[in-house]
Amino acid sequence: MNASKILQQLMQQASGSQTGSSGVDVKGMLSGLSRQLGGASSGQGSHSSGGLDIKSLLGGGAMGMLVGSKRGRSMGGKALKYGAIASVGMLAWKAWQSSQAAKSSDAPASDAQAGAQEGERVDALSGEFQERRSLELLQAMIMAARADGHIDEQEQALITEQIDALGADQEMHDWVEQQLKTPLDAEALAREADSPQAAREMYLMSVAVIDDQNPMERAWLDQLAGALNLSKEMTMELERQAEQAG
C-alpha cells in the first residue's frame, strides 16, 4: 500500500491551493466541481450532468472532492482549511508546545526530549512508520468528510477515481473504497492513533475538512476528541491553529 505517497500529494495540493503558486484558481475549480456534482445523476461515469469531464480535474481535486462533494457547502472560508492540511504535523506540534507553555512558565523541553514521549510529526517519519501515520490521517480525513452523511455512491466512485489518479496501488484503492463505506466509529478511529502527536494530527486533519457550523459535523469532532482523549484546551488550540493557517 502506498498511503504515504497519496497523503504527501494531497498535502501538496493543499499547499498549492493555499498559496496559488500554480497560477490555477483551485478553490474556484473545486467549487465548480461541487456545483456540478450537486446536479449530477447517477450512472454517468466520470462526467457530470453539465458535461464536466471529471478526469480533467484529476490530480488537482482529490483532496477537494472529499469536501467538495458535500452538498450546500461553500468551498471557501471555513469549509476547507488548506493550510491545516498542508502543515498538519507542524501545526499539531505547535498546538502541543502552546499548551505546554500555558501550563508552565518553565522552559519547554527540547523537541528531542518531547518527541520521545509525544511521538514524531508525520513529516519527520519514514518507512513503515510514515506509512502507518499516513493511513491514520487519510482515515481521519475520509471519516470527517463523511460526517454529514452526504457522500452518495456516485461521489464515492469519483473520490476513488481521483485518489487512483494520484498513483494509488490496488491495495490502496481497495482500502479507500472500504473507508468510504465503513460505518463511522470515532472509537475505532482513535484506536489507530499510535502516539499523542498522531492523535493531535488526526483531530487537526478532521478539523481541516469539517464545517463546525454543521451540527452533525461538530458532533463528530466532539466524539473524536473524546475518543482521542484530547482535552478541551487542546482541541481549542488545535482549532485555533487550523483557523490561523487558513
Image (cartoon, helix red, strand yellow):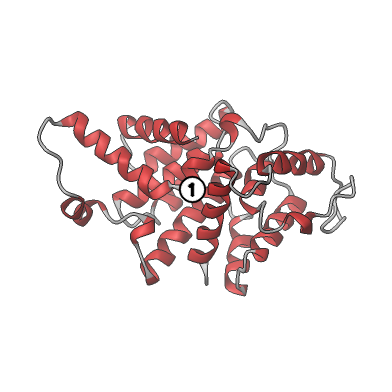
SS under mark 1? helix
* Residue 131 in the image, given as x and y percentages of width and height: 43, 66
Residue ID at (36%, 52%): 198
Residue ID at (72%, 36%): 71
Check the image and report above or below for 149 versus 188.
above
Q: Residue at the left extreme? A: 106
* Image quadrant assignment for residue 80: top right
* Residue 170 in the image, given as x and y percentages of width and height: 62, 74
Task: Name the residue nearer the viewer: 14 or 136.
Answer: 14
Task: Name the residue nearer the viewer: 6 or 139.
Answer: 6
User: In screen coordinates, is 221 left or right of 63?
Assistant: left
Check the image and report above or below for 7 versus 92.
below
Number of numbered discs overlaid on the protein picture: 1
User: In screen coordinates, is 69 left or right of 186?
Assistant: right
User: In screen coordinates, is 11 left or right of 238?
Assistant: right
Residue ID at (14%, 31%): 104
Task: Name the residue nearer the viewer: 11 or 68.
Answer: 11
* Residue 113 in the image, given as x and y percentages of width and height: 15, 53
* Label 1 sits on residue: 86
Residue ID at (31%, 45%): 93
User: In screen coordinates, is 48 left or right of 31?
Assistant: right
Amino acid at pointer 1: Ala
* Residue 64 in the image, given as x and y percentages of width and height: 64, 46
